[in-house]
Image (spheres, rainbow, N blue to C red):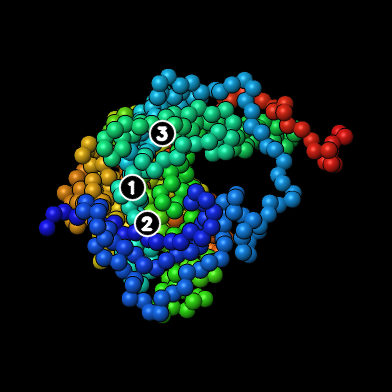
Amino acid sequence: MPPRRLVQTFLYQRVQGKDLEDNHYAHPIDILPVVDLNTRTVVRIDGLDRQPPPEIPQLSVNYHRNLVQTNSYLQNEWRGNALKALNITQPDGPSFSVDGNRVDWQNWSFTVGWNAREGLVLHKINFDGRPVVNRLSLVEMAVPYGDPNPPYSRKCAFDVGDYGLGFCANSLELGCDCLGLIHYFDAALNDSNGDPYVVKKAICMHKEDDGIMWKHVEYRNGHNESRRARELVISFICTVVNYEYLFYIRFKLNGEIEFEIRLSGELSTNLVSAGEDSNDPSYGVLCAPGVNSQVHQHMFCARIDMSVDGEKNTVSEVDVVAHPDPSVENPFGNIFGPVQTVLRSEGEAVRQYDANRARTWKISNAEGKLNKITGKPTAYKLVPFTKGPAQPPLLTAANSSVSKKGEFATAHLWVTPYDELERYPAGEYTPQAKEQDGLPIWIKDNENIEGEDVVLWHAFGVTHVPRVEDFPVMNCEVTAFSLKPDGFSSGNPAIDLPPETNKMSELDSGCCSASK
């Protein structure tokens, strides 16, 4: 038999509107054709045996501007107290500079890259003229759904390997997706015939205000010193069928890098399965009358090729624990502090996050570069879940096909020595892959990682128990991790920011201090 490329195709009904406007996720049809893309034939259709055939929900549950007025029970007109304009202006122009794909901003420099699978890739990230990260990108996702009812037992997507984030990228809109003074980068791709095309404005770069970065008032004389935090944000947005993934890499004035992901778009819906309570499905949440949204996870994996002050680095796990050294007396019971454990091999470096220990992972220089104050190796640390709540790893059982293919998501950290062929943690080819590939195979030889050119694979995600408020379109869920200098500098690297007062700020006319 010739090889087959099989795709299962979820079906929905569009009830109204033109040009595919209607929210079809409010009208799921629970029959599922399986199609062979090579032969362009339908292999089988699952769900036809359900008797009696279920009714397709017909209520209008829309967010499209042309159809909001048709909503059956949600708001059907624009709110009367519309928001006043909030304009972001930079009259003096940008403070970043761009030379081709090379960007410089406030002690930061990096090169912008792109490919069809990962989307945005950043290379040669330096701070204060010193290397920090050699290459940074998102390299895989596993999105399992927790419903054992057929055919949903096989409902799972590996969005990076299956679809390609670059192929799914949006062309961003000025004044909507990106606010302020914007620099865009276009992205070059190829279609299925190998012909080139360009996604205009695929990458957005702009600055944001992030509130106060540091402040102190000397209470003895009332003197205030305060500096605001600005960030250089480079971002792209992907639409992967029903979901939107919004990726933001934030460079901060204090030497931190934050990798933030926001999740929006549409819930993947279905009818309540046969035998379940139509008002209380066992493996999901009713998001509209007769419409079920299954519990699921979005497990991401970032590939972080570190180079802290040089190619050779050592990774340590740092836990904060009570009374870390029992050999030292603790008469007042107030001792607690960090315990640092060097991760010496690939096997030792398969780690879980522990919020109860404030766990972080430190990446230290192993080439003799020492901090001038501490005398210890210069370092950065990986801090998980710096936005959103801490989340569990992959929750599917070890014997499930999802866990076998997506084993990378069963731990929050993996560390391997650099190998140019080790690129994707679930393997090069995720669709229909039968053999396990990727990280669990690579680490079987348990290579040394101490004082080596190391790559960190950070798996993190969002476990999504849907809410009624997530439908018909989902407000953003947020998760993030950060890379923070930890003995990289001799002190606060943002101490040299000059004081400034924003002259455009003004008092509201009704403010009690407006006349003062």
In the image, which disc is placed on residue 406?
none
Say if residue 370 shows up in the picture. no
Q: CA distance from mark 2 to mark 3?
A: 26 Å
Mark 2, residue position: 143
Q: Residues within 10 Å of mark 1 (few under 14, many from 20)?
A: some
Name the image quarter holding the C terminus. top right
Q: Position of residue 500 (x, y in %)?
A: 67, 25
Kindly identify the residue that appears in the image at 47 percent across and 79 percent down.
277
In the depicted structure, whether residue 212 falls above or below residue 100: below
Q: CA distance from mark 1 to mark 2?
A: 13 Å
In the depicted structure, whether residue 112 falls above or below residue 261: above
Of residue 338 and residue 236, the one placed in the foreground of this image is 236
Mark 3, residue position: 199
Quadrant housing residue 416 = top left
Q: CA distance from mark 3 to mark 1?
A: 16 Å
Of residue 494 and residue 163, the one placed in the foreground of this image is 163
Q: Position of residue 147 (x, y in %)?
A: 38, 69
**First-in-chain label (1 vs 2):** 2
Q: Secondary structure at mark 3?
A: strand
Q: Amino acid at mark 2?
A: Val
Q: Left of 142 or right of it: where is 418?
A: left
Q: Amino acid at mark 1?
A: Tyr
Mark 1, residue position: 163
**First-in-chain label (2 vs 3):** 2
Q: Position of residue 43 (x, y in %)?
A: 24, 62
Q: Amino acid at mark 3?
A: Val
Q: Position of residue 224 (x, y in %)?
A: 70, 32
